[in-house]
Amino acid sequence: MKWVGDFETTTAERKKLDGTTHVWACGLCEVGNPDNLVILRTIDEFLSWCENQPTNDTVFFHNLRFDGSFIVQKLLKSGYKFAAEPKDKATRTFSTLISDKGLWYQIEIFFLIRGKKVNKVTIQDSLKLIPLSVKQIAKSFQLPIKKGSIDYAAHDLLPEGSPLTPEEEEYLIHDVQIVSHAV
């Protein structure tokens, strides 16, 4: 299956406050089925969702350079190893496709490799396919939903895993549905 994902994260002000940033929400929308939505509250929940997909799914993030940095950091902190060469791919490894100019194209996460059985998720950058902002995508594709707005700093003082407000959830849903329609 193909999905569109989006993270909401604490701001640079949080980083200045205590030296940390984190993902406080993740939205996922199935490509071709905008009513199939998943809302998660932490990057751990996202990686668990990925690992438990029954097929080797693809997840598109719009601007993978941003969201991907959180994914790679979490994988390394969780004991995953970087597989620099195809022969290095094994259980609990990941590979990336990042240009020498810092353009992020893809992350492949290998949760399990046992013989011919492979459980992986491929994460790709939809911005490379559709070089428009989410707001411009909604307008260009004449979608019935529009990009919203939220107070990004509202989660800066809340602990990781805090619940989302209905407005934050709607904002996240619109973001992934808009890109899902375009992909």
Image (spheres, rainbow, N blue to C red):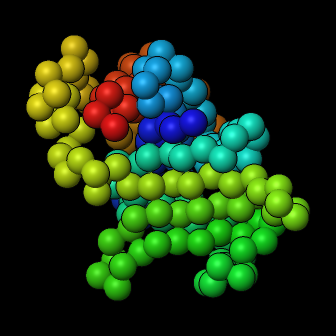
Is 46 placed left or right of 157 in the picture? right
Q: In terms of image quadrants, where is residue 142?
A: top left
- Residue 139 lies, in percent from the top left, at 12, 28
The quadrant holding residue 180 is top left
Q: Nearer the viewer, residue 134 or 96?
A: 96
Q: Residue at x 83, y 60 (%)?
A: 116
Q: How many marks?
A: 0
Residue 93 position within the rendered picture, expressed as x and y whole percent measured from the top left: 72, 70
Question: Looking at the figure, which quarter contains the N terminus?
Answer: top right
Residue found at the very far right of the displayed protein: 114
**Residue 79 appearing in the image:** no
The residue positioned farthest toward the front in the image shown: 116
Q: Quadrant of residue 49?
A: top right
Q: Residue at x 11, y 31 (%)?
A: 140
Residue at (57, 27) in percent of width and height: 38
Query: Toward the viewer: 18 or 88?
Result: 88
- Residue 66, x across and y down, in percent: 39, 59
Given residues 157 and 180, the one toward you in this image is 180
Using the image, determine if residue 134 lies above or below residue 103.
Answer: above
Residue lying at 57% horizontally and 66% vertically, measured from the top left: 72
